[in-house]
Amino acid sequence: MTDQASRIAAGPLPGGRNDLGAFPRGFQPRDRDLQPAAYFPDYKSTVARSPQQALLSVPQTMSEITGPVFGHGDLDPLDNDLIRNAQVDGEPIGERAIVHGRVMDQEGRGIPNTLVEVWQANAGGRYRHKTEDYIAPLDPNFAGCGRMITDEHGYYHFRTIRPGPYPWRNYRNSWRPAHIHFSLFGPAFATRMITQMYFEGDPLIPICPIVNCVSDKKGVEALTALLDMTANTPHDCLAYRFDIVLRGPRQTFFENRPEGL
């Protein structure tokens, strides 16, 4: 095991948000108040998108429950290296970073074999997408997407370029904080969960309407990656720790929970 891998496998930061010693034992019910309401007028898209009537339960089919199955054979060796996986003729521009952490259950136990997909804007705040119209330039050496599978202890890590903030049409001067989108798959598509990760210290976090949908301060903290100087690569990458809890009082906010449509 490399020195970097050893540091990554060392577990949650002592005394941090997901310090294993602070996890309660026994059954812990999900804190439904942590998840925001689907209707939040300050986030204008929710006005039209939020359901106006009671939700219907749609039975899942056998194929949705039992498949597909993901394995390490489906991944390319560079899938978790966003710095290298789209290079054409040079290095991507921007602050290089390592993001790492664990996917855990409510007892602090790691969840192995979880497919983690990530996508993000480049250092200028622009996505590589045909409908993107922000004036920041595209980076020909950065695609902004990757994937990985958690190990037997629930650990994951990837290298990337820290994304830039960008404007959006919520109100006249709205800017999104730097963020990375995460998608987590269990054994089937029906188990997919989606969330966003922010960076510690970003001044745009407390004034973002999307962030403010989460009224509980602990919920916002659960979406914020902490600077981790124990896992950085000297003269190369800073590191940020982002642990994801699937349910219980310490659960991470997921955008596709019923409460957060």
Image (cartoon, rainbow, N blue to C red):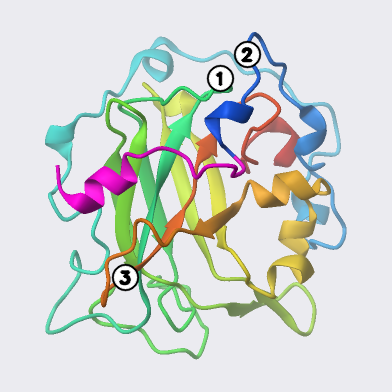
Residue 69's spot in the image, x, y percent?
A: 27, 23
> Residue 126: within the magenta?
no
Q: Quadrant of the N terminus?
A: top left
| Earlier residue among tags 2 and 1 | 2
Reading the image, the residue beneath label 3 is 237
> Residue 5: within the magenta?
yes
Residue 15's spot in the image, x, y percent?
A: 59, 42
Q: Residue at x 42, y 19 (%)?
A: 64
Instruction: Give the magenta-colored segment's residue range.
Output: 1-17
Q: Is residue 186 left or right of residue 164?
A: left
> Residue flagged by tag 3: what amino acid is it?
Cys
Residue 77's spot in the image, x, y percent?
A: 12, 50
Q: Is residue 90 left or right of residue 135?
A: left
Q: Residues within 10 Å of mark 3 (few under 14, many from 20)?
A: some
Q: Is residue 31 above or below residue 223?
A: above
Reading the image, the residue beneath label 1 is 107
Reading the image, the residue beneath label 2 is 25
Q: Are marks 2 and 1 in contact (CB under 8 Å)?
A: yes
Q: Are marks 3 and 2 in contact (CB under 8 Å)?
A: no
Residue 210's spot in the image, x, y percent?
A: 72, 59
Q: Is residue 233 left or right of residue 10?
A: left
At mark 1, the secondary structure is: loop
At mark 2, the secondary structure is: loop
Label 2 and label 1: CA atoms lie apart by 6 Å
Instruction: Pick whichever, 49 or 188, lies toward us.
Output: 188
Label 1 and label 3: CA atoms lie apart by 31 Å
Label 3 and label 2: CA atoms lie apart by 36 Å
Instruction: Pick whichever, 133 or 111, lies toward us.
Output: 111
